[in-house]
Amino acid sequence: MIRTLVMLGFWALLLPVAALLGFPWTFLTGNINFLYRISMWGAFAGVRLTGVKVQVEGLEKLDPDRAYIFMSNHVSNLDPPIMLPLIPRRTSVMVKKELFKVPLLGQTMRIGSLVPVDRGNREAGIAAVRAAAEVIGKKINMLIYVEGHRSFNGKLLPFKKGPFYLAVETGVPVVPMTIAGTHYVMPKGRFAIRQGVVKVIFHDPIWPAEFGNRDCLMERVRRVIDSGLEPKYQQASA
């Protein structure tokens, strides 16, 4: 419990700095980069203050001058503040559409090219895919948790189809990512954080054009992400 409070307290102390420096600069210039750097540094530093150690594999496989669609498993609230700061270049994510109605925050997210999504509405989901395609067209990465929800048991849930429509439509290479260890450090439904080691694996980029259809691409990405999990969480062990 104390570790979680330390992390949240650090983020709370950093928020006024972002509000006083980052927000005015962002609104005056229309450029999110300064605020993005502050946010990414703060997110990762807050997690490290809890005693969580992060091991990274495969970053050297990425071309820092191009955009990718990163697709990952999702097991913990700690996943985004660990993963996003590791990705080279500015990266967008899909967030609940309700957050865009919050004053200042909503405007900032629009400037940052975040994508609103309504998970319960199929038509809205199609609109989110189109919006994500526009973001990628700006050479901004997308990080997508392809299960749509966090897993309770650490094993992969069924994948959503939308991210694979996006990949096929844009032709942008997909980078499967596996995060392992956050299921132990802070599993879904738990507030307290344990000390531990988290591993983040950037797998080889996959070009959608190499696959005959969306389903084949989805199956390939699923196998790759699954291969990075601990053996007891892999599908083969189910």
Image (cartoon, helix red, strand yellow):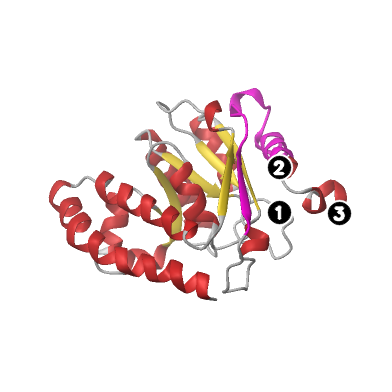
Q: Which mark is residue 228?
A: 2
Who is closer to the viewer here, 194 or 135?
Answer: 194
The magenta-colored residue range is: 196-224
Amino acid type shown at disc 3: Ala
Residue at 63% in and 62% down: 185
Q: Quadrant of the N terminus?
A: bottom right
Q: Which mark is residue 158?
A: 1
Who is closer to the viewer here, 171 or 15?
Answer: 15
Who is closer to the viewer here, 133 or 69?
Answer: 69
Q: Residues within 10 Å of mark 1 (few under 14, many from 20)?
A: few
Q: Nearer the viewer, mark 1 or mark 2?
A: 2
Residue at 53% in and 62% down: 119
Q: Which mark is residue 238?
A: 3
- Number of numbered discs on residues: 3
- Discs 2, 3 touching: Cβ within 8 Å: no
Which label's residue is closer to the chain start, 2 or 3? 2
Amino acid type shown at disc 2: Gly
Give the vertical position of 95 relative to 56 (above or below): below
Residue 72 visible in the shown view: yes
Q: Judging from the image, what secondary structure is the residue with disc 3 in?
A: loop
Which label's residue is closer to the chain start, 1 or 3? 1
